[in-house]
Every structure is written in structure tokens, then in C-alpha cells.
Image (cartoon, rainbow, N blue to C red):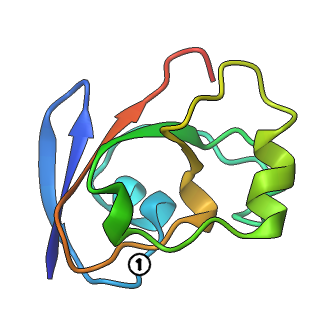
Amino acid sequence: MTTLTIMPAGTTIEAQPGTSLLDAIKAAGAQIMSKCSGKGECGACHLYVLEGRKSLSKTQRVENEKLDTIVGVSSKSRLACQTKLGEEPVTVELLSFV
């Protein structure tokens, strides 16, 4: 199990490595948008990874292409539906403008 902390609420949960951030966030009861059923097409689940980026799955082409179309993207940006948890603790920030 690994630890996921969801900001700004500060909710911390245990999740199985290999679980998508989207599924883990929803399991924690946090509100996150997803209009494309996790296919990486809508960009609504854009969030910032504050800590633990190196533990996450690598960014794939579909995710990179969608991030290129989103306003407010930074080096901390990921799509929750395309990002899988690794073994190390991760802290993410849900974005209110999504």
C-alpha cells in the first residue's frame, strides 16, 4: 500500500500501487471531475502533483497531448485518470478552476 494525500482538504488515504489517481481520489470521497470515463480525452481531472512525482507512472503520449491543450499547466501537472500510483507516498492538489 502507498499513501495518497489530497490537498487542499488534507485527506490522506492508503491505496494500492497501480491504482489510478482518479480512482484513488474518488475512493477517498473527494470531488474530482471526469467527463471521459478515464480515457484522457477531456482534461477535466487535471491536477498538480506536489510530492512523489518520481513514484508515479510515466506520462504517455495521450496525456501529454491533452495537457498541451489545457490552460494553467505546469511541470507539476498530470491527468488523474492517466496517472498510476507507485510505491512512494504522493501528495496532489485538486484544482478548483477545473
Residue that carries the numbered disc 1 in the rendered image? 19
Residue 39 seen in the current view: yes
91 sits to left or right of 3? right
In the drawing, does residue 39 fall left or right of residue 85? right
Q: Residue 81: x and y, percent?
A: 60, 61
Left/right of residue 5 with respect to residue 25 in the rendered view: left
Q: Residue at x 63, y 65 (%)?
A: 59
Residue drawn at 57 percent across, 48 percent down: 78
Viewer-proximal residue, 35 or 48?
A: 48
Q: Position of residue 71 (x, y in %)?
A: 76, 20
**Residue located 19% across and 71% down the image:** 88
Label 1: which secondary element: loop
| Residue type beneath disc 1 | Thr
Q: Is residue 28 left or right of residue 73?
A: left
Residue 72 place in picture, x, y as percent? 66, 19
- 85 or 14: which is nearer to us? 85
Reply above or below: 34 against 50.
Answer: below
Residue 42 makes an appearance in the image: no
Q: Residue at x 48, y 71 (%)?
A: 20
Q: Position of residue 80 (x, y in %)?
A: 54, 54
In which quadrant of the rendered image does the N terminus lie? bottom left
Picture quarter with the C terminus: top right
Q: Is residue 23 above or below residue 35?
A: below
